[in-house]
């Protein structure tokens, strides 16, 4: 009986300690939130699986790049979109987030490359093709080069822009 009472008190103490700990963590989180990563930035990645087009191919991948462009437009951002494809599957996609994230480097291609690298868990994107609604700018082409992307296509007609290089 006494033993039970001691255990009950220990449990009570543990619960109180847990609550105290939780309260401290919550307070810490509340303090850190405004100084931490801005919300728009933190929410930028879609953690769900990427819906794949019914038929793989340049037309379908470019259609997705333009769907990303539409997302950018609807979000009030610059109208650009891009996707990264490997082995016939979209492995990264993004609209431009320059305005919504307040980041001059958040071009659609940069964001799609980041998305692909994060999803694949690798900074090396060899075997990948970058599709973008407009031809990649020098910054994005250099990023594609450093990521080891094999090729670039752009525009409605999926024109081949070749292998990325350092401009
Ligand atoms: Zn760019």
Image (tube, grey):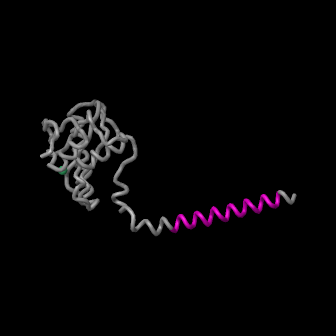
- Looking at the rendered structure, the number of numbered marks drawn on it comes to 0
User: Is residue 21 placed above or below 70 in the rendered structure?
Assistant: below
Quarter of the image with the N terminus is bottom right
Q: Position of residue 61 (x, y in %)?
A: 24, 37
Q: Is residue 151 left or right of residue 46?
A: left
Q: Position of residue 164 (x, y in %)?
A: 17, 40
Of residues 112 and 3, the one drawn nearer to the viewer in this rendering: 3
Query: Is residue 75 located in the magenta-colored stretch of the structure?
Result: no
- What residue lies at 28% left-to-right and 38% top-to-bottom? 125
Q: Position of residue 14 (x, y in %)?
A: 69, 61
- What residue lies at 27% left-to-right and 30% top-to-bottom? 56
Q: Quadrant of residue 147?
A: top left
Q: Position of residue 105 (x, y in %)?
A: 23, 55
Q: Is residue 83 left or right of residue 136?
A: right
Q: Quadrant of residue 15?
A: bottom right
**What predominant SS class does the magenta segment belong to?**
helix
Magenta segment boundaries in residue numbering: 4-27
Query: Is residue 15 located in the magenta-colored stretch of the structure?
Result: yes
- For the view shown, which residue lies furthest in the right direction? 1
- What residue lies at 40% left-to-right and 68% top-to-bottom? 34
- What residue lies at 14% left-to-right and 36% top-to-bottom? 162
User: Is residue 26 placed above or below 144 in the rendered structure?
Assistant: below
């Amino acid at each position: 009986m006494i033993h039970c009472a001691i255990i009950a008190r220990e449990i009570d103490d543990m619960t109180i300690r847990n609550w105290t700990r939780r309260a401290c963590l919550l307070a810490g989180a509340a303090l850190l939130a405004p100084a931490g990563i801005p919300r728009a930035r933190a929410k930028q990645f879609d953690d769900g699986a990427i819906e794949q087009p019914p038929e793989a191919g340049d037309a379908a991948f470019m259609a997705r790049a333009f769907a990303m462009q539409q997302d950018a437009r609807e979000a009030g951002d610059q109208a650009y979109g891009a996707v990264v494809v490997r082995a016939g599957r979209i492995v990264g996609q993004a609209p431009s987030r320059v305005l919504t994230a307040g980041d001059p480097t958040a071009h659609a291609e940069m964001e799609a490359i980041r998305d692909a690298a994060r999803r694949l868990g690798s900074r090396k994107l060899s075997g990948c093709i970058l599709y973008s609604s407009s031809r990649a700018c020098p910054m994005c082409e250099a990023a594609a080069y450093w990521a080891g992307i094999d090729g670039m296509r752009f525009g409605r007609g999926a024109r081949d822009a070749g292998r990325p290089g350092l401009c």
